[in-house]
Image: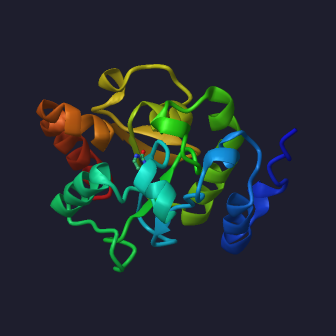
Amino acid sequence: PLAARPSGVAAMDWPALREAVAGCEACGLCRSRRNTVFGVGHEQAQWMIVGEAPGEQEDLRGEPFVGKAGQLLDNMLRAVGLTRAEAGPEQQVYIANVLKCRPPMNRNPEPQEVAQCEPFLKRQVELVAPKLILAMGRFAVQSILQTGEPIGRLRGRVHAYHGVPVVVTYHPAYLLRNPADKSRSWEDLCLAREVLR
Ligand code: URA
């Protein structure tokens, strides 16, 4: 049987949370992962970006969005004056995923994996206390907004997660396959930027 997720996540500081994620064995993904992927960025960032789960590159490097989708994300962020590079809390974002471990062959996250991992993301949001969350893709949106509604029906307006404004957009990996939707994603980024004005 798998060990439970460490208790007390809701009260952890950054070092404790980091350690809890690194040693988590709450679901079967701990058996196939090479590295956990905690999250990166400014710990007081105004923008928090939430993706789905580590892919192959992320699993190898222990860092979110370092593959092809990550390159597109970096370009999208740059277009609105944001960066993952070292900068102030207004420019440097914080990036995290719903799942901290890679699903084998990049399959979709299972509901029970999302449920086990959710307290980690929730605590990250509390610690960063961003002014805006950009939820990218179906799984981030489902987890954060607790809805099964498709992205197409949720984008274009501002939602909330524990009082933090949330803007929804397509996942960059989806945009790589469906470049025609990039203009919609651009609109979403502009909406997010408006929230912070
Ligand atoms: N896709 C995600 O959702 N997250 C990553 O970190 C990489 C690819």
**Vertical placement of residue 72 versus 11, above or below:** above
At a point 57% along the width and 60% down the height, the residue shown is 38
Residue 57 screen position, x and y as percent: 41, 56
Foreground pick, 195 / 87? 87
Residue 144 screen position, x and y as percent: 53, 38
At a point 45% along the width and 72% down the height, the residue shown is 42
| Residue 184 visible (yes or no) | no
In the picture, the quarter occupied by the C terminus is bottom left
Residue 26 lies in quadrant: top right
**Vertical placement of residue 159 versus 80, above or below:** above
Residue 109 lies in quadrant: top right
Residue 120 screen position, x and y as percent: 66, 52
**Vertical placement of residue 154 versus 48, above or below:** above
At a point 27% along the width and 32% down the height, the residue shown is 156
| Residue 5 visible (yes or no) | yes
Give the left or right position of residue 66, taking residue 9 as reference. left
Total labels: the figure holds: 0
Residue 78 screen position, x and y as percent: 20, 63
Q: What sort of colour scheme is used for the picture?
A: rainbow
In the picture, the quarter occupied by the N terminus is top right
Residue 23 lies in quadrant: bottom right
Give the left or right position of residue 103, taking residue 75 as reference. right
Give the left or right position of residue 48, taking residue 68 as reference. right
At a point 36% along the width and 80% down the height, the residue shown is 86
